[in-house]
Image (cartoon, rainbow, N blue to C red):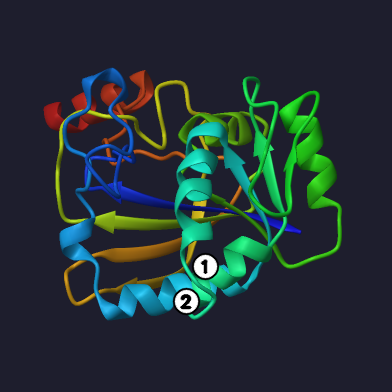
Amino acid sequence: MKLVVGTFLTLDGVMQGPGGPEEDRSGGFEHGGWLVPYFDDMMGKVVTAWTEAADGLLLGRRTYEIFAAHWPRIGDEDPIARKLNRVRKYVASRTLDRLEWNNSTLLEGDVATEVAKLKREPGRELQVTGSGNLIQTLLKHDLVDEFRLWVFPVVLGKGKRLFADGAIPAALKLTDTKTSTTGVAIHTYRPAGKPDYGSFMLEEPSAEEIERRRKIAKS
């Protein structure tokens, strides 16, 4: 399966608490629910289509608990709820010992090793939503095959970020982009190896070149 990270981000890279004020107040975060005013029908259709492509969900503890408290209460008439309630769910957590949401499995042992095993299983996509701490582990071990980044036109100044300090330098290739009616840019990226570097600075002339120019100026 292809491992896909889908994340809602502010313009300054914050991914914390997008869906509501009480979603994640850790660290004193007071801006929860920042994505809600921007959600439109186009975004709903994109979420539905991407969710249908999932053959597995990979979630951290906090995101799993939020999803498990919400989606089982939504009926099968909602296509997202129908899919999420039935699809295989893999949870990375050191504190949970009981999973009650249908078709949920707790990953045991080293998370990176277990995720690498899941990726070798047949299927389309193993999708990660939210799960900021888990994503840092996936990035560290180069396990992400695709990023779907929803960039919202809002700046918060504080909060958990997708690419936190210490992120491994990497180049990405833009493979698709869409824009909602509310100005949300939805970008799809795939890893493209290590970054290339260059410079617009003028090169300093060599000692030989300086001497040549001096002689020309005297002649």
Residue at horizontal 50 percent and vertical 72 percent from the top: 75
Position of the N terminus by quadrant: bottom right
The amino acid pointed to by label 2 is: Asp
Residue at horizontal 45 percent and vertical 43 percent from the top: 66
Q: Which mark is residue 64?
A: none
Q: Position of residue 180 (x, y in %)?
A: 25, 74
Q: Is residue 119 visible?
A: yes
Q: Quadrant of residue 109?
A: top right
Q: Is residue 18 left or right of residue 52?
A: left
User: Mark 1 falls on what kind of element?
Assistant: helix
Residue at horizontal 27 percent and vertical 24 percent from the top: 210
The amino acid pointed to by label 1 is: Ala
Question: What residue is pinned by disc 2?
Answer: 78
Q: Which mark is residue 81?
A: 1
Residue at horizontal 86 percent and vertical 63 percent from the top: 122
Q: Quadrant of residue 113?
A: top right
Residue 95 in the image: above or below residue 101: above
Q: Are marks 2 and 1 in contact (CB under 8 Å)?
A: yes
Residue 199 in the image: above or below residue 175: above
Q: Is residue 196 visible?
A: no
Q: Is residue 177 left or right of residue 25?
A: right
Q: Position of residue 135 (x, y in %)?
A: 54, 36
